[in-house]
Amino acid sequence: MYAVIETGGKQYRVTPGDTIVVEKLAGEAGAAVEFDKVLAIGKDDGELVVGKDVAGAKVKGSIAGQDRADKIIVFKFKRKKQYKRTIGHRQDQTAVKIAEIVA
């Protein structure tokens, strides 16, 4: 069984036992987290449930850790104007261990 959830403006396909990295969520490592914005559920017999049929579905998990992503470099440049700026950015992220899918 798998589910498609939405968090942080992105969609993730998860199954029980998976560990996914999402945008930062509040909480410490080991805290329970629940995703109630479930977009689809794929069952073991090949059936796909979408739309209003997944209205009460939830995906439960726990926070595995808080971290920061790799640094990306933002470089701004305007030709012929002697303008250059270099900025680095590291996004906060959370690792979530998926425990179960409640359909």
Image (cartoon, rainbow, N blue to C red):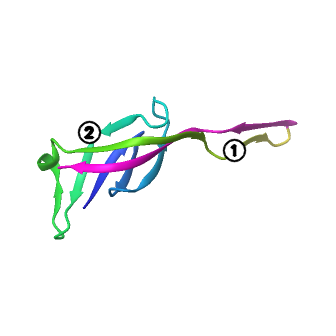
Which quadrant: the N terminus? bottom left
What secondary structure characterizes most of the magenta part? strand
Q: Is residue 81 above or below residue 14?
A: above
- Report if the CB atoms under discs 2 and 1 are less than 8 Å apart: no
Check disc 1 and report its element: helix, strand or loop: loop
- Judging by the rendered image, the residue that carries numbered circle 2 is 36
Q: Quadrant of residue 57?
A: top left
Q: Which residue type does callout 1 highlight? A: Lys
- The answer to whether residue 73 is left or right of residue 22 is right
The foreground one among 37 and 73 is 37
The residue type indicated by label 2 comes to Asp
Total marks shown come to 2
Q: Which mark is residue 71?
A: 1
From the top left corner, tell me how far across and down residue 97 is, in percent. Answer: 42, 48
How many C-alpha atoms fall within 10 Å of the one at disc 2: few (<14), some, or many (≥20)? Answer: some
Answer few, some or many: residues within 10 Å of disc 1's Cα (few below 14, many 20 plus, some between 14 and 19): few
Q: Of 56 and 97, which appears nearest the observer?
A: 97
Q: Position of residue 47 (x, y in %)?
A: 15, 66
Locate residue 70 relative to residue 24 in the image: left or right: right
* Horizontal side, residue 102 vs residue 87: left or right: left
